[in-house]
Image: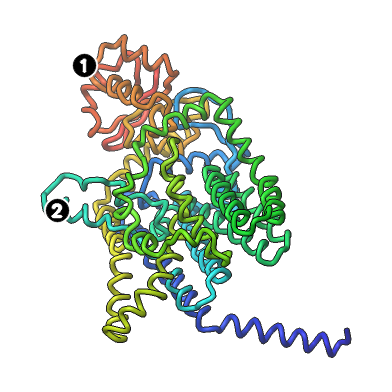
Amino acid sequence: MSIQGEMIRSEHLQTAIKARLWHPETIYSTIFITSIIIIASFPTIFAYVTAPEDRFFTGVVYNIPDHNQYFAWLRDFRYQHLAANRLTAEPNEPALFHLLWWISGKAGVIFDLSFGAIFNILRIIGGITLLISGYLLFRVTIANEVQRKLAFTLFATGGGLGIVWVIIKHAQKLEDAPFPFDIYTSEPNSFFLVLAFPHFALALSLIIGVIGFTFVAYQRQQLRYAIVAGICGFLIGLQHAYDILTLAAVLGIFGLLVWWRDRQFPTFLFKCGIIIAAFTVPPGAYLSWLVLNDATWGGKLAQFDNAGAWTPNLFHLPILLGVPFLLALASFRLKMLRSQDNAELLFAAWFVVHFVLAYLPVSFQIHLLLGWQVPIAVLAARLIHTRIWPWIRQRFGSIGVVTATVAILGLSMITNVYLVVWRIVDLGRYQQPYFLTSDEVKALEWLATHTTKNDVVLGVLEINQHVPPWTDAHAFLAHWAGTLDYYVKIDMVAKVLDPNTPSAERTAILDMYNVRYVIVREQDVEREQFSAAAGEVLTPVFTQGAVTIYRRQ
């Protein structure tokens, strides 16, 4: 090709790129994504800006126990490639590799970032990645622009109707809202993921990547896209391996339905499946081997029941998943499972598969809700665009359509609006576990400089769960799953700190788990009483305000 031809081709390419970048839909999606990220950041910004001088904000706005677990891994990954389970007193060798926190640990060292800073950078990256991946999936699967925008809006902002339980709580003056998992389950709520769960947001981005690239590969009959899907699957296996079940189920059922519809074996889809499996199975096999052969990690998974986190029953799904779910149910037709439209077939299969995944008899079933919001948004948008709007427009005109749309979107978002306000109100108390007092920070800093990976620190859960992220030591009690024999150790901590416990019994517990340090706050036990009772075996080595650290003699 001549130089002039190359120049013309380059000019055409630049013109096409500019046209795409300045396309109204691109501008809309960019503004929309930016707005979601900013709104979801309100609680974090509030906590950082308003924190009193004597309070340290951890950077986490919800679910401290799990995020402290990740921060403990992150701390280990700063200078090594495998992490030990330091949320329990039992000695164990580093054996876990987790790609997300490995990268975060290395980046934290390079850029000298605190765990809170790393977490919130991840939260923003995860949120942007999730929203862009969702938009791009809808871009390649939904031809109609208006319907695509509707699906994207519902995917990004749609939540449940859990606020009804909050209203009932206040109306009946209850101590807690009934059915909390109807309100606070994050996996099927994209906005909640952007607000507080970057690892889930990134995992869902990869789920979308695997399914989206597989769909593109099938549509274009090009295996190179299946390789990209496989790479996404590999990354999922090293970050959130539960989702391999979702991928296998959705793509497997999609392939079977294509076979049933076309009356011939889907050879190309089978090749895609082989490629994806080649990438995805090895990391999944590694984690399976780990939990089956390592007593510490196997014991952690076995304690998943401790969370009491099960998918709400079928009758509660309309509350958990809200208006978009109800619209998706109304939109779904069995004939979609034999549709000649591959996109319609894919989303119909994905929607149905999650009814099974959500209730698999496994302790982590609630995690398998992750991703359900995608087909729900697509089916709901289809119903609004093709049936609800025409019906209302015929009877009530354009004003009726606008009113109905505002009502639908408002009801879809209302619980997420509550989540933002609730987190701001809760964080505004400046209390544990999201804030540490200056005394607690000084105590943890002292432990960081005086402990090694061989030491065990004992204390009540509220303060002791911060030991693994802040120090290299093991925590006697830190996490509902990571701490082996969790409830037994809660009782043991109570006995150790109880001044009335016989000295021999306290000593036996300390010796059984090789406890080196005990951290005690005034709100846990009165200092003078405890010192008098435990003085035979524990010596105070640090005191700062309300916090004292004792060392085993």
Circle 2 sits in a helix, a strand or a loop, which is it?
helix
Q: Work out which residue is located at the far left of the displayed protein and give it.
A: 172
Amino acid found under the numbered disc labelled 1: Asn
Looking at the image, residue 407 lies above or below residue 316: below
Q: At x 36% / y 12%, what residue is drawn?
A: 508
Q: Name the residue at 53% across, 24% down.
A: 295
User: In whole angstroms, how far apart are the C-alphas of marks 1 and 2?
Assistant: 40 Å
* Residue 534 higher or lower than 251, as above or below: above
Instruction: Count the labels in the image.
Output: 2
Q: Which residue is mark 1?
A: 500
Q: Is residue 304 left or right of residue 282?
A: left
Residue that badge 2 annotates: 170
SS at mark 1 in the image: loop
Does residue 52 appear in this view? no
- What residue is drawn where x is 45% and y is 36%? 362
Q: Nearer the viewer, mark 1 or mark 2?
A: 2
User: In the image, what residue type sits under mark 2?
Assistant: His
Q: Position of residue 196 (x, y in %)?
A: 40, 54
Q: Nearer the viewer, residue 60 or 97?
A: 97
Q: Nearer the viewer, residue 446 or 427?
A: 427
Numbered badge on residue 312: none
x, y percent for residue 335:
48, 61
Q: Badge 1, how many Cα within 10 Å: few under 14, some, many 20+?
A: few
Q: Position of residue 47 (x, y in %)?
A: 33, 57
